[in-house]
Image (spheres, grey):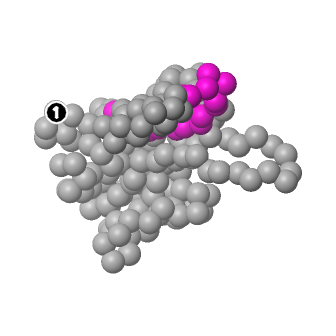
């Protein structure tokens, strides 16, 4: 077995096991973004299991809505992480989403809807070293004139691609879903 076949087989075994695959060359740069919802600040009783939920506006692992009242504000904390091997500048923004036939679809990344218009972030961009993270406050404010119903959105964190023309750009981003139900 050649040296490279052994490295490839080891990488496949680690990937199947869900572990990180070490770079074959130290100069290989990888990009990555990660997000995690940490809590619902100031909302006692929102987490029946004593831990953060998986989506904005829900409880019980996203199975139950946590209704908002017109005129109310709720804040969340989202941890943004650089999962790559190089320092990255990242952008954070709310965008539209939809639910069709029971399937959740994020919008095109910059589109706006009711949920994304009612959502703001404490930071619009940040720079993170490899493995670094930063907490961002997400604020959802429901207008006093809001009508009952549910709207959908996403809060994205994504790597800002380098400028230049003639390059292929890959969108590297991760997001937290929003299910905003007005009582």
Query: What's the magenta bit mostly, secondary-structure-wise?
Result: loop
Question: Which residue is at 20% across, 56% downward?
Answer: 64
> Where 5 falls versus 104 (above or below)?
above
Q: How many marks?
A: 1
* Residue 97 shows in the view: yes
**x 46%, y 54%: residue:** 154
Which residue reaches farthest bottom? 101
Report if residue 78 is visible in the image. Answer: no
Question: In front: 167, or 149?
Answer: 167
Task: Tell me where the magenta segment starts and ends, as one range.
Answer: 23-38
Residue 172 percent location from the top left of the image = 58, 46
Q: Residue furthest front?
A: 1
Image quarter (top left, top right, bottom left or bottom right) of the C terminus: bottom left
Task: Identify the residue at image location x=50%, y=23%.
Answer: 131
Magenta segment: does it hold 22?
no
- The image position of residue 99, as x and y in percent, is 38, 70
Tell whether 132 sits left or right of 146. Answer: right
Which residue matches tag 1? 50
The reply to whether the magenta stretch includes residue 37 is: yes
């Amino acid at each position: 077995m050649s040296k490279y076949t052994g490295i490839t087989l080891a990488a496949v075994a680690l990937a199947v096991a869900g572990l990180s695959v070490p770079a074959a060359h130290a100069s290989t740069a990888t990009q990555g973004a990660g997000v995690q919802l940490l809590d619902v600040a100031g909302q006692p009783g929102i987490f029946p299991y004593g831990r953060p939920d998986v989506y904005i506006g829900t409880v019980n692992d996203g199975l139950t809505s946590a209704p908002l009242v017109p005129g109310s504000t709720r804040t969340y904390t989202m941890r943004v992480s650089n999962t790559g091997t190089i320092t990255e500048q990242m952008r954070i923004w709310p965008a539209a989403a939809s639910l069709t036939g029971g399937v959740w679809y994020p919008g095109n990344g910059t589109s706006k809807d009711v949920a994304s218009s009612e959502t703001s972030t404490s930071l619009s961009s940040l720079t993170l070293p490899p493995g670094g993270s930063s907490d961002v406050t997400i604020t959802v404010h429901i207008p006093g004139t809001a009508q009952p119903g549910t709207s959908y959105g996403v809060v994205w964190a994504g790597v800002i691609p380098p400028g230049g023309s003639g390059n292929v750009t890959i969108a590297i981003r991760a997001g937290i879903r929003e299910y905003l139900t007005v009582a």
